[in-house]
Image: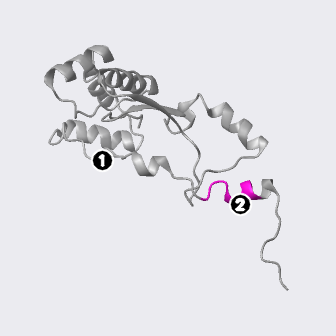
């Protein structure tokens, strides 16, 4: 008579089945839009040429002057108030620094009247299950935890609310 059940340890069960039914909350709840067309500068030949030259590492004095002339001369808080007063909540802001993204995200989140939640980012492998780390990998991950500049600009914890938009560094 063959055995129907084989006794296995709790550790083996957790290893094999621990993430079997885990839902990838990032894929299920977060919509990602990538800015691919610069509508504001469409038709601006100077800006187009400048972006093209910067893309290939050709930075000229003319390019630097063009960039300097187009820098916001006000704080992020002032820009947010301007966007808010215009009623253009769907505006997209592109920032070059993580801190600037973080600040505008905080201001936008504060203006929402829905419940705020903190969503930790877990590393998810290709099979959509949460990755398991050994001690060495865990230590490396911990070092990067508070350095979004080394994680493609992604935060390790996102503060979200229903209806919020998140701006990330490009």
Q: Position of residue 75 (x, y in %)?
A: 31, 14
Of callouts 2 and 1, the N-terminal one: 2
- The kind of secondary structure element at disc 2 is helix
Q: Which residue is mark 1?
A: 36
73 w.r.t. 13: above or below: above
In which quarter of the view is residue 121 placed? Answer: top right
Classify mark 2: residues with Cα within 10 Å, few (<14), some (14-19) or many (20+).
few
> Which of 115/2 is in front?
2
Q: What color scheme is it?
A: one colour
Q: Which residues are magenta?
A: 13-20
Give the CA separation, mark 2 to mark 1.
41 Å
Indicate the quadrant containing the C terminus: top left, top right, bottom left or bottom right: top left
Q: Which residue is mark 2?
A: 16
Indicate the quadrant containing the N terminus: top left, top right, bottom left or bottom right: bottom right
Q: Position of residue 61 (x, y in %)?
A: 33, 27
Residue 19 falls within the magenta-colored stretch: yes
Q: Which mark is residue 86?
A: none
Q: Is residue 92 left or right of residue 118?
A: left
Residue at image position (61%, 59%) is: 20
> Which of 146/58 is in front?
146
Q: Position of residue 49 (x, y in %)?
A: 26, 41
54 w.r.t. 8: above or below: above
In which quarter of the view is residue 168 placed? Answer: top left
Number of numbered discs on residues: 2
Q: Position of residue 136 (x, y in %)?
A: 78, 41
Residue at image position (31%, 44%) is: 35
Q: Work out which residue is located at the far right of the displayed protein and give it.
A: 1
Q: Main secondary structure of the magenta part?
A: helix
Callout in the foreground (2, 1)? 2
């Amino acid at each position: 008579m063959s055995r129907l059940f084989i006794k296995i340890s709790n550790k083996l069960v957790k290893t094999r089945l621990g993430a079997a039914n885990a839902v990838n909350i990032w894929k299920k709840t977060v919509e990602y839009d990538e800015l691919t067309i610069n509508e504001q500068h469409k038709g601006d030949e100077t800006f187009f040429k400048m972006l093209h030259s910067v893309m290939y590492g050709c930075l000229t004095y003319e390019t630097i002057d063009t960039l300097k002339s187009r820098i916001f001369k006000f704080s992020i808080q002032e820009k947010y108030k301007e966007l808010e007063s215009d009623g253009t909540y769907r505006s997209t802001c592109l920032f070059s620094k993580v801190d600037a993204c973080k600040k505008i995200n905080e201001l936008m989140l504060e203006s929402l009247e829905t419940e705020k939640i903190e969503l930790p980012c877990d590393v998810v492998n290709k099979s959509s299950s949460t990755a398991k780390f050994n001690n060495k990998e865990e230590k490396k991950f911990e070092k990067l935890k508070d350095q979004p500049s080394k994680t493609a600009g992604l935060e390790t914890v996102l503060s979200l609310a229903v209806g919020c938009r998140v701006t990330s560094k490009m």
